[in-house]
Each structure stands twice: as C-alpha cells, then as structure tokens.
Image (tube, helix red, strand yellow):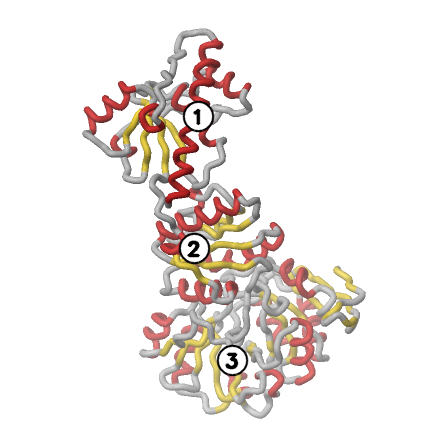
Amino acid sequence: MIKRFFFERNNAIIGCMETIIEKIDKNQIDKEVIAKAGEILRRGGLVAFPTETVYGLGADALQEAAAKRTYEAKGRPSDNPLIVHIADYEDLKKVAVNIPAETDILAAHFWPGPLTMIFEKSGVVPYGTTGGLDTVAVRMPADPVARAVIRAAGGFVSAPSANTSGRPSPTTAGHVAEDLAGKIDMILDAGEVDIGLESTILDMTVDPPMILRPGAITAEMFEAVIGEVGVDETLLGDESNKAPKAPGMKYRHYAPKAQLIIVEGDLREEILAIRQLAYAAHRQGRKIGVIATNETVSFYNYGTVRNIGTRENEKTIARNLYRVLREFDEEDVEAIYSESFAVQGIGRAIMNRLEKAAGHTRVSASAVVKKQRYRRITFVSGSDSARGPMAAEILRHLDLKQEYVIDSRGMVVLFPEPANQKAEAIMKSARMTLADHTSRQFDEGNLQDDTLILTIDESEKNKIISEYGEHENVYTLNEFIGDTTAIPDPYGQPLAAYGKCYEVLNGLVIKLAEKINSFAEEE
C-alpha cells in the first residue's frame, strides 16, 4: 500500500489521499478486490487498472463529477475527450445513437480488443466525459481484469491512460504509481500489458470510417473486413490547432522529460547521423540517449543506448516504447535521438506516438551527416598480435574530432590468438590494454571506400596491392603522415624493445590524429 498525504498542482495543495495498490492475477481474479474497485468507481472515485493496451485510469463514465476528477488527477485539458469502456456489446446502444451497420461486423472481428469507435453520443453520456463533443468514443477491452472492473462499476467506465497528462503512457502498475500515487483511490497491479500502445481509434460518424489514431489494428485489417477506410493525414503532423475529436490527438503526449528528436532518412544514414550526434555530445560532456533496435544497437558507442525491440517484429517495439521513454527519465539525459520506423502496419502507430512524444521535432539524417573522408581506420601488420593492435589502441585514446571505428588486421593470421604478452605489458604501463584483442586476417572485405588502411611496413602495403589491386585508401602509416621514422619490429626481443616500439608508434599516431582532425576542420 502506498500513502500520500497531499499533492500539489499549480503550486496549491488541493487534497490528500491514500492510494491502495492491489496485486491481481488475470488467470485467477480476486472477486473481493474487483468488488472493492467497483464500489470506488460507483461512488465517483478513480481506479487504475490494466487493459491489453496500456493501464487506464477508470471513472464512472456517466458521472460528470467523476470526469472532472479524472482531468484533475491527470492534469489533463478538459477538452480532451475520454474513452468509454464497456464489457458487453449490448451496452453500446445505451451510450451511442445512429450506430452504422458496419459496427456489427467490426465488433465481431475486433471486440473485445484494441479498437475504439466514435459514434454520436446518447443523452446519458455527460459532456464532461466527451470533452464537450456530441460524439462518444467507445471501446470493449480484452483484458479480463478490465472487463471485470467495468461490470463491477455498472458497465460504463471512462479510462484514459493512467499517467500524468503528457507523460509516456503506463505499461506497468509501477508507472501508474510513479505519476498518480496520492491522487487516485486504487491501482490494480496485474503486471506488464500485452500491446503497449493505445487502441486504434476509428471514426464511425463519417463515410467511409476514418482512422483518427493508429494502433495495433491497422487500415489493412479494417479493409479486409469492411472495405475502404480513410486515414487522417495529420496523424504524423502537427494538428495542435485543430479541435481534438479523438483522445490524445491535440496536445503533446507520451513525452519524456528530455527533448526527443526523431532522425529521419534511410537506416544507414540514420545510424551515421545519430552516431555523429552522440559522439559530438560525448566530446562536449553532454549526456544523451539513443533509441536503437536489436538490429542496430551494436553500432552505437556513445550515449545511453536503449534497445527498443526488433524490426523483424515491430510489436516488440510497440510494447517497449513507453517503458524505454520512462527509463530515459531515470537516466537524466539532456536529449534523446531516435531512429525512425516504416509508416505501415503497426509502424504507423509507433511513429505517431514518437511524433507526439517529440513534439514533432525531426531532423533529416542527411542534413546531420557531414561528409566524412573516413569512417573506419584499420592498421595492418604481419600477424596482428603487437604493432597493429598497439597503434589502434593508442589512436582510440586520443581526442578525435570525428568518430571512427578503429581496428587492426594481419596479413598472415593462421588462427585467432590474443595479443603478444609483452605488447600487453607495455600497453598496461601506459594505462591502456590489449586484453580484448584477438588477431584477425585481412581480406578484400576490409577495402571499403570509407576505410583508411594503414600498414605498419611497406611489405604489407605491397602485398595488399599485389593481391587486391591498387586502392586509393591504402598507405603505410609513415607515408600517410609524412614521417620517415622507422617502426621497429620487437618480435622475439626483450620487453625493452616493445617499449621502444611503443614510443615510436605513439609519436606517429599522435601525428595521425592531428592529420585526421584537420580533415574534420576542412569538412
């Protein structure tokens, strides 16, 4: 049980309340807990409960005063309509009139489920519930706890997302408590929700019906059942000056505390742009977040990176979106950069929520990505066990104005092996390490247009050219920086020889860093 003795809004103390939190099992529902929740709702109280989409903040949909309490608890504008939740299809006729014929087939396919339909309202629904509109939004949730609560409350429960208005919607009871403990009567905790995004909203007062908010039920799914449906073209735009016919469609919603910025372009450009933004923030000492996917998370080396799910199954992205946004609040990041997603299927709903959370702040990936001469620097030595890995590690520890993938390869690597122990001892004395290094064979795949190949000796350069032909990005390290200092080969010699090798490499690599930093200034 969580207790709050007062809470503040607009700098004024407006009440005190004890919030009861009850665990409930969807597979074995406690009737006494449900009865208690129903009693609270019937007397005008507020109960947060799970649905298959997000946690909802329940109130008696037919009580004007209950709607007012909902708006006050959430800090929600009173012109933002609430969705009326029902548990039985027959109850639709009590709150809606002039119900189109297609409703029966839509309900047969998608109710109970993540579909909200908008109808002309009946006289029993107060304007407080509909945000002053003559239409009412109605949904029949599939979650068994939700349906039990609705029936216990009398059949009609308004239930916007159970969060402070504008914040990411709650997908766990913990999210609800974080925002609303002390402001509402009860929270029913049934664990994490299944879908993670709010229901699809379909306007049934127009012909053909029109999607006003995308969700798990897509346009293609509707069209397979009833034929043509419209899609509100402002879904991925800024419609803040329009009257909000659908809940959550006017104001900035789902937003973390930090500014969220969507980076748009093809996926490769997005990755490069976010990497560049994250690296620049790192050099400035700024803490930023990155929203990545299972397919791209390994490409990011800087910032607080969160894997939101897999692009192969965008339902995982939908389910994790709000959780990830809330996690960034805990990390206290200054800004969050997110990849974009395909605007089709449930991807449309994901992008709609991201757009809302970002306040429609987008940047073009191509506009961010600077023309960078090289993005990878590969040092090539004979066996990739000492000099090449040492040079790569030295460069990683220098202050570079642009981000590079820095690695090493060998021309003769019979099998993977760790770095030379003497080379590692020298690097440790310089507060660096080759502990994670494993030797790798150089091959044609390393010859990319954005890769600078730097060989330790002339012999490795000549071998690359003889095997793979001339390539404009292949140099010896000395040649590239214009320094003739010979790099000694310490193989088979005492530790002191490795120390001398390190000293020479360190001086040469510092010059290398200066040269590639000059490229950044030119570009």
Tell me where residue 503 appears, x and y as whole percent. 47, 18
Which amino acid does the dot numbered 2 rest on? Answer: Glu
Q: Nearer the viewer, residue 497 or 305?
A: 497
Residue 473 drawn above or below residue 231: above
Residue 437 is tagged as 1
Residue 244 is tagged as 3
**The residue tagged with tag 3: helix, strand or loop?**
loop
Pointer 2 or 3: first along the chain? 3
Q: Is residue 364 left or right of residue 240?
A: left
* Residue name at image x 60 percent, y 55 percent: 329
- Which quarter of the rendering shows the C terminus? top left
Pointer 1 or 3: first along the chain? 3
From the image, tell me which residue sits under label 2.
339
The alpha-carbon separation of the residues under discs 1 and 3 comes to: 58 Å
Which amino acid does the dot numbered 3 rest on? Answer: Pro
Which amino acid does the dot numbered 1 rest on? Answer: His
* Residue name at image x 43 percent, y 57 percent: 263
**The residue tagged with tag 1: helix, strand or loop?**
loop
Q: Nearer the viewer, residue 470 or 171?
A: 470
Q: Nearer the viewer, residue 134 or 269?
A: 269
